[in-house]
Structures are given as structure tokens and as C-alpha cells.
Image: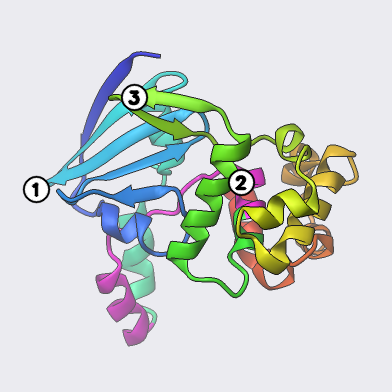
Amino acid sequence: MKEQIYSIENANFYPSHIFDCGQCFRWKKQADEEYIGVFGNNVLNVKREENKIIFKGICDGDIKQIVDHYFDMQTDYDQIKDVLRKKDQYLATSIEYGKGIRILNQDLWEMIISFIISANNNIPRIQKIIDNVSKEYGNKIIWNNTTYYTFPEPNSLKQASVEDLRKLGLGFRDKYIYETTKRICNGDIDLDKLREIEDTNEIKKILESMPRNRSKSCRLYYTIRYA
């Protein structure tokens, strides 16, 4: 894969609001206020210069298409915020505080596992555990003489035993990751079909049947709607 660069003008796109709000765990802040993240088979550097957002990295496809989808660029967040800020003063204050947030179109499988890992956890430790899992079972991507690791596919992670997962720092979450991976690999849960279901209650029921996902089902459902 060759390095690609893409830039946009967007006054309400703030990397720190997007990457530090707890919706994702694979973006790392650099000393110069830039962020580097891994998603899918892509590694990107994202930085803001005044109102210009610059994306640079190696992508599994066209960088513009990948950025537009991942960062949900087709949604008019300004219009949404204009409606919400009129509803309530608390909403207006919250919108101003996080005016640069965008809801990422993350991979559903990665979201499920990440949310299980997030149970009774803090963001730095969640990031470390996900990094450990990715280094052990993901694929290498080398960019700018630095090695990055993709999030492992279900068939790769299913190689891990409960004991293997525990060694990566998962703690009590190891059995939940193991059981969820096994159910998905066995076809008990079809993530592709899950996205096609229109009945909200049916989706919620399936999500809550996954180990340790009951309290996270609303966020997982939101992810399905925008995947």
C-alpha cells in the first residue's frame, strides 16, 4: 500500500473531541497534537491546521472514500446540532463543549469486543489491552518505519484459549471474549444479518444475549445503524 494524503475544510471537526471521547480506542495522541490510528487495514495520521483537516497514511483503498465513510462525512452534524441546541440549555452547553465530535463508522466486530473489554475499565487500560490482543492475533502493517497491528478477525482470535486471553491482561473479561468469539465463528450470531434486521427489539435481544454486552447494547445498536 502506498501513502496517500487527503484534506478537507471543516470548522467543526476536532480530532481530540472525536478520539478522546471514549467511542474508540485505537487512536493515539502524538506530541504535536496529531493522532495516529489503526482501523480495518488502514493506518492514518489526522491533524487539524486552523479549519483544515489533513489525513495522511496508508489505506486499503482510496483514502477519500475511506475517510468519508469512517468519519461519517455524509451526515450534516451542523444541522443536527442546530436542532438539538434549541431543545434544552443543557444540550446547548454539551454541544458547545463537544462541537467537534463525529460518530465513527467502526467495524461492528471490533466494537463488540472493545465494549466487552471496556467493562469496569478505564480508557488507557482498554487501549493497552486492545493493543496486546492486536499484536498477538492481528496482522502487521509497517508505515514510516513503525509497525502497527490490525484488530484480529474472528477466525484469528478464536485460536486463543481463555488462558491465552488472560495473559494479555483481560482479567475477568477473558471468558466473555472467548465465548463471544466462539459464538460468532460458529455462526450462532451472524453480524452481517444483524445489520439487516429492522426490528429494534430483535436487535437489542441478540446484542444482550452476548456475554457482558447488556449495558452496552444501546451503543452497539447505534453502531449497527451507521455501519
Q: Residues within 10 Å of mark 3 (few under 14, many from 20)?
A: some
> Can the viewer see residue 60 in this picture?
yes
The amino acid type of the residue labelled 1 equals Glu
> Residue visible at 25% across and 72% down?
96
Mark 2–mark 1 distance (CA, rounded to whole Å): 32 Å
Q: Nearer the viewer, residue 144 or 10?
A: 144
Figure quadrant of the C terminus: top right
> Residue visible at 79% across and 56% down?
199
Give the structural element (helix, strand or loop) at label 1.
loop
- Residue 73 horizontal side relative to residue 106, left or right: left
Q: Identify the residue position indicated by label 3 in the image.
A: 143
- Residue 64 horizontal side relative to residue 126, left or right: left
User: Residue 189, position in %: x, y?
Assistant: 85, 46
Residue 129, quarter of the rendered image: bottom right
Mark 1–mark 3 distance (CA, rounded to whole Å): 26 Å
User: Residue 69, position in %: x, y?
Assistant: 45, 36
| Residue numbers of the magenta segment | 88-113
> Residue visible at 78% across and 57% down?
203
User: Viewer-nearest of labels 2 and 3?
Assistant: 3
Q: Identify the residue position indicated by label 2 in the image.
A: 110
Q: Nearer the viewer, residue 66 or 92?
A: 66
Q: Which mark is residue 50?
A: 1
Given the current orientation, which residue lies at the most extreme left position? 50
User: Viewer-nearest of labels 1 and 3?
Assistant: 3
Mark 2–mark 3 distance (CA, rounded to whole Å): 22 Å
> Residue visible at 66% across and 44% down?
109
User: Viewer-nearest of labels 2 and 1?
Assistant: 2
The amino acid type of the residue labelled 3 equals Trp
Q: Is residue 72 magenta?
A: no
The amino acid type of the residue labelled 2 equals Glu
